[in-house]
Amino acid sequence: MRSTVLVTLFALMVAGLAVAAEPDAIVGVWATEPDPVDGNAHVEVWKEGDRFFGKIIWLEKPEYAADDRMAGQPKVDRENPDEAVRQRSLIGLRILADFRSAGDGEWNKGTIYDPDNGKTYKCVARLADDGRTLKVRGFVGFSLLGRTTEWTRVEP
């Protein structure tokens, strides 16, 4: 009886580790850290071939605030260096591109676009042990020169 319980516990632990290390574990919807001005966003991550991408699918505050020059209008990619795309909506905007699974709950070699300043950064993402928190680090050059935010999985 005791050996059956131990074998069962061991099998559950191994299954749990397999889920945490699953290359597709990043796929789903993630809530960004709340911003004091803009609230937070939901980013949907999906897989195409062997790469992962993400786009904004929801904004807590989808319109510009009353004190903004575009007050009441839907938020757009107005800081983009390419004038031709500055009117595209933030909802539906692809902000994560070309991530590859590095194994062990990490994705790298991707980029993240920051619509607040119109810049694109190199990026890595790591799934925390809880399986519900994604640590997203954007950086210039190498990862020591960057910033990490924590995103939380949105359950369906």
Image (tube, rainbow, N blue to C red):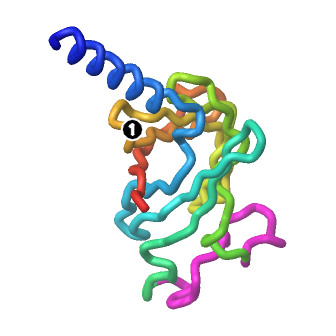
User: Outermost residue toward the right?
Assistant: 84
Magenta highlight range: 68-87
Answer whether residue 49 is magenta in the image. no
**Residue at position x 49%, y 33% from top?**
126
Spot occupied by residue 140 in the image (x, y as percentages of width and height) = 63, 35
Answer whether residue 70 is magenta in the image. yes
User: Outermost residue toward the front?
Assistant: 1
**Residue at position x 67%, y 38% from top?**
99
Residue position marked by numbered label 1 in the rendering: 131
Spot occupied by residue 39 in the image (x, y as percentages of width and height) = 39, 68
Residue 111, compared with residue 89, is above or below; it is above
Q: Nearer the viewer, residue 128 or 67?
A: 128
Most common secondary structure along the magenta stretch: loop
| Secondary structure of the residue carrying numbered label 1 | loop
**Residue at position x 65%, y 43% from top?**
121
Residue 92, compared with residue 49, is above or below; it is below
